[in-house]
Amino acid sequence: MTKELERPIDQLESVPWTEEEIAEEIRHQAAERSCGADGIHIRLLKALAGTVFVGWLYRLYNRCLAEGRTPQAWNDSEIHLLSKDPDRPRDADNLRPISIIYVFHKVLERLLLVRHQSAPWARLHPA
């Protein structure tokens, strides 16, 4: 019989986000970025930031937080190769990848980052 590993739960992990935190993060997002495979642009969320739509996101994001998972579709992303130098479009050393993710996932990632950026484990990566 295997004993379950118990880890202390960071108090911040169990605190739900507020509707204001979510609306503020939506307002913080850059409007020039591309939309994801779902076709939803951040400009739509910005237009809805002062409406009852934020209440829906509040329930969705806090459920993701409580369950420790996100909707399966959010795990998809599109990878596009951009040319650094237009004179060498076929040179592999001249290409850089970018990932396009769902806007709802992008907002959730930023909420998590803002909440945990001062945690010691969040500073492990040198980037």
Image (cartoon, helix red, strand yellow):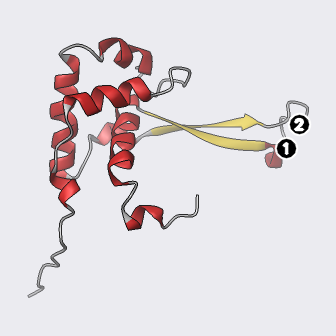
Give me the C-alpha separation between circle 1 and circle 2: 6 Å
Using residue 48 as the reference point, say whether residue 30 is left or right of it: right
State which quarter of the image contains the C terminus.
Answer: bottom right
Residue where numbered disc 1 is placed: 91
- Marks counted in the figure total 2
Q: Residue furthest left?
A: 1
- Estimate the x, y position of residue 123 in percent, counting from the top left: 47, 63
Q: Residue furthest bottom?
A: 1
| Residue in view at x 39 percent, y 41 percent | 110
Residue nearest the viewer, comparing 127 with 84: 127
- Identify the element where label 1 is drawn: loop
Quarter residue 96 falls in: top right
Q: Which kind of residue does numbered mark 2 sit on?
A: Arg
- Estimate the x, y position of residue 32 in percent, counting from the top left: 56, 21
Is the residue 53 above or below the residue 117 in the image?
A: above
- Identify the element where label 2 is drawn: loop
Residue where numbered disc 2 is placed: 88
Residue nearest the viewer, comparing 25 with 74: 25
Using residue 91 as the reference point, say whether residue 26 is left or right of it: left
- Estimate the x, y position of residue 108 in percent, counting from the top left: 33, 39
Is the C-beta separation of discs 1 and 2 under 8 Å? yes
| Residue in view at x 47 percent, y 39 percent | 77
The reply to whether residue 41 is in sight is: no
